[in-house]
Amino acid sequence: MREITESTIHAVETKARSLRRHIISMLGEAGSGHSGGSLSAADIVACLYFWEMNVDPHEPHKPDRDRFVLSKGHAAPVLYAALAEKGFFPVIELDSLRKLGSRLQGHPDMNKLSGVEASTGSLGQGISWAVGMALAERMNGPDRYRIYALLGDGEIEEGLVWEALMAAAHYKLDNLTAFLDHNRLQIDGPIAEVMSPEPVADKFRAFGWETLVIDGHDISQIMQALELARSTTGRPTAIIADTVKGKGCSFMENKAEWHGTAPNREQTIQALEELEVSPQRA
């Protein structure tokens, strides 16, 4: 197993904070888009792109690259922020989010932007796509690359999700790791009130997945979970990451109304000021 050091954790924490600042800036510029679920996923995505995955912006189509599928495609800002920070395109292009002719559409488009592995947005289809990728990797030969997917709370109310989870376990796809951004809110309110999927972890286990429950804002826990996923054989791994919708912006946190709302100018300034301060670590 790879060593998880304090310096490595700090470096990824710094990247996550940068991703959040990019998210706020681009949504403020666009005047529309999905804030809450992009911010809640920033620590997960930072760990994937700046610690875990084998991806290279200079060889974006190399056959042995790891694949990431943003199944909750409306959280595209967090993916775009990571790709820009990784060097797939200039950071300044983030200001073009949702503008006419931009490569940065409201949902990811793999035909427009290098580094995007799947065009997602129709909820439930991304995890199915990821299962197909994992099956393809198995057919091409074992251990060439790994597949990662990120799902949302409201998304797992889709029946298609559970068909995909069942197939992944049936085919013993231990090259597949799925994160659930478990912030307990969706566009219409708390998932417990809209259509409760709980107990989520028990359901994943019942469908045959190795299942871990972690703090989705604790970089060390995310890294340890990814290490365990790598060492798991014979079944896919689900990482249920407990998160806070709108994480990092005090006026957005745990509020469903920020699911698909962009900050205005004053709110953008406030959020960026809050995100400028490094979090205190225990």
Image (cartoon, grey):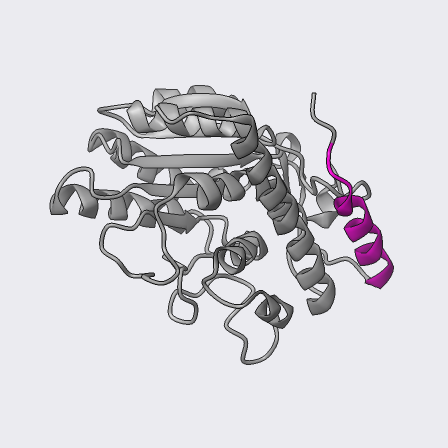
Left or right: 29 with respect to 88? right
Question: Which of these two is toward me, 41 or 57?
Answer: 57
* Secondary structure mostly taken by the magenta-highlighted segment of the chain: helix
Q: Identify the residue shown where x is 22% and y is 30%.
A: 172
Question: Which of these two is toward me, 62 or 183?
Answer: 62
266 inside magenta stretch: yes
Most extreme residue toward the bottom is 101
Q: Is residue 205 above or below residue 70?
A: above
Give coordinates of residue 23: x percent, y percent: 65, 55
Q: Identify the residue shown where x is 67% and y is 46%.
A: 36
Quarter the C terminus occupies: top right
Question: Which of these two is toward me, 209 or 266?
Answer: 266
Q: Is residue 108 above or below residue 242?
A: below
What number of labels is visible? 0
Give coordinates of residue 41: x percent, y percent: 57, 42
Q: Is residue 245 above or below residue 3?
A: below
Q: Identify the residue shown where x is 49% and y is 67%.
A: 89
Q: Identify the residue shown where x is 20% and y is 43%.
A: 144
5 inside magenta stretch: no
The quadrant where residue 42 appears = top right
Most extreme residue toward the front is 7
Give coordinates of residue 118: x percent, y percent: 37, 57
Question: Which of these two is toward me, 223 or 109?
Answer: 223
The quadrant where residue 138 appears = top left
Give coordinates of residue 131: x percent, y percent: 29, 43
What segment is highlighted magenta in the picture?
265-279
- The answer, for residue 179, to whether it is visible in the render is yes
Quarter the N terminus occupies: top left
- The answer, for residue 196, to whether it is visible in the render is no
